[in-house]
Amino acid sequence: MATEAVIGRSTESPIDFVVTDTMAGGPSNSDTQSVQSTISRFACRIACQRSPPYTARIYAAGFDSSKNIFLGEKAAKWRTVDGQMDGLTTNGVLVMHPCHGFTHYSKQGVWREISVCGNVFTLRETRSAQQRGKMVDSESQELVDGSLVDLCGATLLWRTAEGLSRAPTLKHLEVLRQEINAARPQCPVGFNTLAFPSMRRKDTPDEKQPWAYLRCGHVHGYHTWGNHQHHHHHHRPEEERDQGQGQESRQRERECPMCRARGPYVALWLGCEVGFYLDAAPPTHAFSPCGHVCSEKTAAFWGRIPLPHGTHTFHAACPFCAQQLSGGDATSGYIRLIFQGPLD
């Protein structure tokens, strides 16, 4: 016996998990409503065995309320050798199984496309091309811990119960936050003590919020030193953060007072989705250019995993806000943070 879950953007009763397009920078993006969704109404279904080994298999498309497989008019369809109908959703369901699972030994797997019958294919030339790829008989549609499922607008991470049992808990992340704050890191310019705010994220940084120069990793409080664009001291940190969203991140370029390196200067936020962490190590690294902070192995993993973007491109992205990674240390998309301890 297997339990089947249907995933898609439709809100009809057969859909178990409704997904909407992920906008880079998080759900606060004001353009979310105006962009037409590229996720299929009935995107995929996952069948999970109810008894050990609890195998989970993924299939493209889903059954609508009349118990028929729902495919769009433009979706590729064909008859197989044994007479069965098979097909692909309009923009495809792509799956990537990382080699060695979701661990710090993980290496990037190969992105493949899954058909309605669960067959595995190489990618089409573009997401919605009519011509399907070549079938890959040697590979399975079975999901493993760390499998990534891309629905052309949202990327899902599959975690197993066993895998999550090794992940940190929110309570553990809260302890790590308190340990960082207990060390009383200081701003090298203002000499004020810095502290990460509680995990219940707010929209605007508070006055003790750590900020970092993402070219070198030096951590400061918010200040206007070296800000060649704004000479007014009443300029507020939330204004700078607003200007830094999306394409305007160039406006955040600042010179570090410690080492003179020029680069993005952003508020730091602890990433608080535990399922994205590879280990329970302290949060020592930040993604660039968004400033989300996590452990080194977590940053290294997401920094080397290319996620589908648009119709035929791939790029690494921050798992916490989906922003494309750029810069950081040796253009890896993340940087080791350098905190200054108290002088007393």
Image (tube, helix red, strand yellow):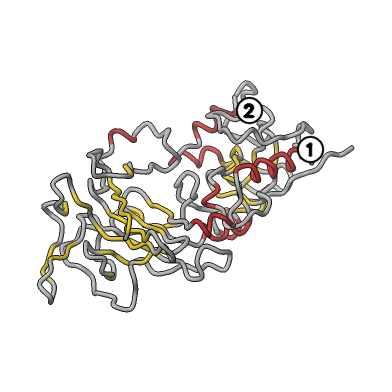
Q: Secondary structure at mark 2?
A: loop
Foreground residue among 177 and 13: 13
The amino acid marked with disc number 1 is Arg
Q: Secondary structure at mark 1?
A: loop
Foreground residue among 204 and 216: 204
Q: CA distance from mark 1 to mark 2?
A: 16 Å
Residue at (13% x, 72% y) in the render: 80
Q: Is residue 36 left or right of residue 326?
A: left
Which residue has dot 2 on it?
A: 206
Label at residue 220: none
Q: Are discs 1 and 2 less than 8 Å apart at CB? A: no
- Residue lying furthest right: 344
Residue 148, x across and y down, in percent: 41, 58
Residue at (40% x, 57% y) in the render: 307
Where 61 sits versus 107, above or below?
A: above
Residue 293, x across and y down, in percent: 60, 46
Quarter containing the C terminus: top right
Residue 248, x across and y down, in percent: 46, 38
The amino acid marked with disc number 2 is Asp
Q: Is residue 303 left or right of residue 122?
A: right
> Crowding near pointer 1: few (<14 within 10 Å), some, many (20+)?
some
Which residue has dot 1 on it?
A: 184
Quarter containing the N terminus: bottom left
Q: Is residue 186 left or right of residue 7?
A: right
Residue 5, x across and y down, in percent: 31, 51
Quarter of image, res 113: bottom left
Where 225 sits versus 175, above or below?
A: above
Quarter of image, res 53: bottom left
- Residue lying furthest top: 234
Total number of numbered discs in the rendering: 2
